[in-house]
Image: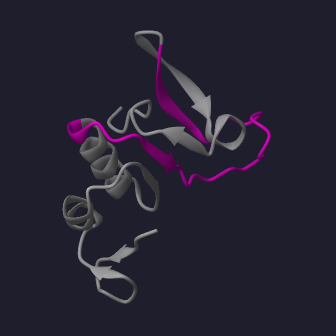
Amino acid sequence: MRVATEDGSAGTKGFVTTLLAAERPASIYGCGPLPMLKAVAAYGADHAVPVWVSLESRMACGVGACRGCVTKIRRDGGFVYENVCNAGPVFKGSEVIFDG
């Protein structure tokens, strides 16, 4: 496991993408803010590295009834809206549509 923090308070100081370029991981598991997860997923796609992201979302009901935590996920050449609370919270980075 490797840790990166922007301010250097833990692990490597700087963006996680700098750490990834130096380490060349075989797989990536990420949690944190969406812009960082988007960058990690893009790195994985560019370097053929499998990425798993834990999406942190408000989960009002926690059972999928309220649809408050939906996110856009690639499926079968299109997309679906999945509840983070019961379909995740961990998704393949290549499946998550971060812009949309």
Residue at left offset 38%, top offset 52%: 37
Q: What colour-coding does the image apply?
A: one colour
Can you give x and y, in whole percent of width and height, for residue 55 in the image? 53, 49
| Residue that sits furthest to the bottom in the current view | 9
Q: How many marks?
A: 0
Residue at left offset 47%, top offset 29%: 72
Can you give x and y, in whole percent of width and height, for residue 51 in the image? 41, 44
Asked if the stretch drawn in magenta spans residue 61, the answer is: yes
The residue closer to the viewer here, 89 or 72, is 89
Asked if the stretch drawn in magenta spans residue 67, the answer is: yes
The residue closer to the viewer here, 89 or 2, is 2
The residue closer to the viewer here, 3 or 75, is 3
Can you give x and y, in whole percent of width and height, for residue 82 in the image? 60, 29
Residue at left offset 21%, top offset 38%: 46
Task: Give, as a single range, the part of the protein colored magenta.
Answer: 46-75
Quarter of the figure with residue 74: top left
Q: Is residue 39 above or below residue 71?
A: below
Q: Is residue 29 left or right of residue 26?
A: right
Give the main secondary structure of the magenta stretch: loop
Can you give x and y, in whole percent of width and height, for residue 1 in the image? 46, 68
Q: Quadrant of the C terminus?
A: top left
